[in-house]
Amino acid sequence: MPEVLPTDSVGLVSPQAMTFQQPLALESGATLAGYTLAYETYGELNAEHSNAILICHALSSNHHAAGFHSMEDRKPGWWDTCVGPGKPIDTNHFFVVCSNNLGGCHGSTGPASVNPATGKPYGRDFPDIVVKDWVHSQAQLADALGIECWAAVVGGSLGGMQALQWSIDYPQRLAHAVVIAAAPHLSTQNIAFNEVARTAIKSDPDFHDGDYYQHNVIPERGLRLARMLGHITYLSDDSMHAKFGRELQAGSPTTGFDMEFQVESYLRYQGSKFAGEFDANTYLLMTKTLDHFDPAKEYGNDLTRALKQAQTKFLVISFTSDWRFSPARSREIVRALLENNLDVVYAGIEADEGHDAFLMKIPQYLEVFSAYMQRIAAETAAS
Amino acid sequence: MPEVLPTDSVGLVSPQAMTFQQPLALESGATLAGYTLAYETYGELNAEHSNAILICHALSSNHHAAGFHSMEDRKPGWWDTCVGPGKPIDTNHFFVVCSNNLGGCHGSTGPASVNPATGKPYGRDFPDIVVKDWVHSQAQLADALGIECWAAVVGGSLGGMQALQWSIDYPQRLAHAVVIAAAPHLSTQNIAFNEVARTAIKSDPDFHDGDYYQHNVIPERGLRLARMLGHITYLSDDSMHAKFGRELQAGSPTTGFDMEFQVESYLRYQGSKFAGEFDANTYLLMTKTLDHFDPAKEYGNDLTRALKQAQTKFLVISFTSDWRFSPARSREIVRALLENNLDVVYAGIEADEGHDAFLMKIPQYLEVFSAYMQRIAAETAAS
């Protein structure tokens, strides 16, 4: 709990929600009869509406990117490191929007929402959602907020993929895309890890084929396993070693099989915490959305062709120890952008923190990110 | 099913079992009142008893290292690539012994065996077993077989760790140790993956706190998840890509969330197959044994000191794409051996196959391994 809010914080923020009454045609062919997007905003939209930044969140995150919901809040939003006065996404300059993805479980319409056709939660009947659908729904949010063109669409991990998709689908509606710790599509190994997580959830007897809401249970065991596994892939081998090594948990016996390593109780704690907070159907949906993301697919698996219509300027950032979406995956994106003669800055950051580095206070990263965003701020001030 | 047995096969083999009536004092302080080791042998023990090779198996393997149990057998033993006439462990020269580790589920005394004290399966009451206990029980098997000194103790992965432990505990009883794709102890990440697997098994409602035998069920869901996860860590990102890429399973829809990647059905198949064959309590035990393996621990975390008493000659092999036990981990072992002025050959093999490379037909690997074993054959012939 911050007794006094930090001066570089956006301070107390309130989630908002925008409900769209018109049906949303999805890429799958299905239609969503109206939907709600939960979102937050930080900073002020300028008179020209030229200083708006869209933040896209990662797999298990949400619209609460920065600041605190109350003075009792123990932790700020998930990207507070990068969003706030004087931070890379400087709220003294920018009007920042972050929305919970469609299919999410933090206020946007998702599998736990009531299906107007049945009066019950959608559950497994919630339609398939792909990244294009997120972008499309966010464009409607932009319309509603009076934002014709984003100064930048920014995201890490799955959020970076979303920024990339924005540059393909709405080339006129963003000046810059910032694509951090992302990949042009998931590797076989990435898909394999997701499938283990999904199998854990679906094989939990409390899953009830996705209709656990009616049974007043949650597939807690499955979600816990999914999160434990995810967590390993977000950290590097080195960062896990530095954080825990082979140290024993306090109170653990020092010999015998009851001996417990710190990393074991840490993972179980993270898993249990997550299971109490996140909807299992949303986790299934988001991992499927990730697996299916592959903008090159409809262009003969040629990413360069997929990005032909992009007119955006790009900042691409990767981290050396990220083995989930390695620097080589970012360079695939950079290569395709360069082949289209697009304006691209690429920063391969030396960092031990693994995939989660994009959330962390890593000086070299924050400097590169800040410098690039200041360039955007200068452009929007001049326009 | 081989209609005709391959000429480089050890042919039809029969598992054997040796029962020891005397109690076995375990490292934990507990005592096992008698025990059985299942084992197989290939080739002939020479008159001097100088040509015996002990093969130590990996986590989920067993004593069936080579050959076929019947003409209907569809697959040979797990290390048939390396064991047989003319193969690296050449049964024309060597008498080969491979035993199922204590705590196993393929004939050796383990959690599924009947506890003489209760008349019921041990279940969770089976004592903690560490690698030293395996070595100790194998030394008793060696005594019973009339083998005073092994020409070599050989193993990959956990089996390599066991070979290393042999060199520490019985320096006079092996001339060579062959340590393949191993590590001096598990990394934090290795332990983390094991803990996810254990949590999957223990949180399966059919686990019944380890007493599932009495309930006539097996924790099939948990075992399947454990195996799926293990499998990912045994392969490299590159080998998974080469094997499956983003190819779809035959019969899969080409769009929508019902679309299925080949890697997904492959993993589920491997998981289900394993769950029908392997005992969950043994899986818990073996992963704990792995986590606890750390010969340097009682020597102030100094591996060089731990290996001071070793008198063995060593072959250490690693594989470039092995991210479970990376080449750097093998080099830690090599460094400690060299600091003790031991005779060591180290081969870092270029291979895309990940950790499982030690089981595979990789020419450079088989050549190095063969050459080293031929040197041992020459020594034993001369002795």
Image (cartoon, coloured by chain):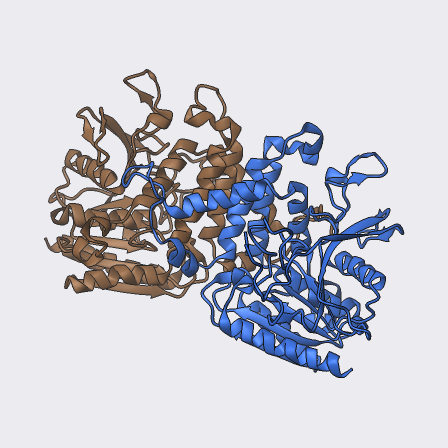
Chain colours: A blue, B brown
Give the vertical position of B12 relative to B328 (above or below).
Answer: above
Q: Is residue A130 visible?
A: no
User: Which quadrant of the view contains residue A10?
Assistant: bottom right
**Image quadrant for the C terminus of chain A?**
bottom right
User: Which quadrant of the view contains residue A379?
Assistant: bottom right
Give the vertical position of B345 relative to B67 (above or below).
Answer: below
x and y percentages locating residue B201 in the rendered image: 47, 35
Left or right placement of residue B39 versus residue A269 in this view = left
Outermost residue on the right side: it is A22
Compare residues A171 and B153 and report the one nearer the observer.
A171
Give the vertical position of A282 relative to A217 (above or below).
Answer: below
Left or right placement of residue B168 versus residue A92 in this view = left
Q: Is residue B325 visible?
A: yes
User: Which quadrant of the view contains residue A210?
Assistant: top right
x and y percentages locating residue B31 in the rendered image: 22, 28
x and y percentages locating residue B307 in the rendered image: 18, 55
Compare residues B337 and A334 and report the one nearer the observer.
A334
Task: Please give the name of the residue rendered at 70% of the width and 33% of the height, measured from the top-left corner.
Answer: A213
Task: Please give the name of the residue rendered at 48% of the width and 19% of the height, measured from the top-left corner.
Answer: B215
Left or right placement of residue B269 versus residue B81 in this view = right
The number of discs equals 0
x and y percentages locating residue A222 in the rendered image: 57, 38
Compare residues A243 and B226 and report the one nearer the observer.
A243
Outermost residue on the front side: it is A4
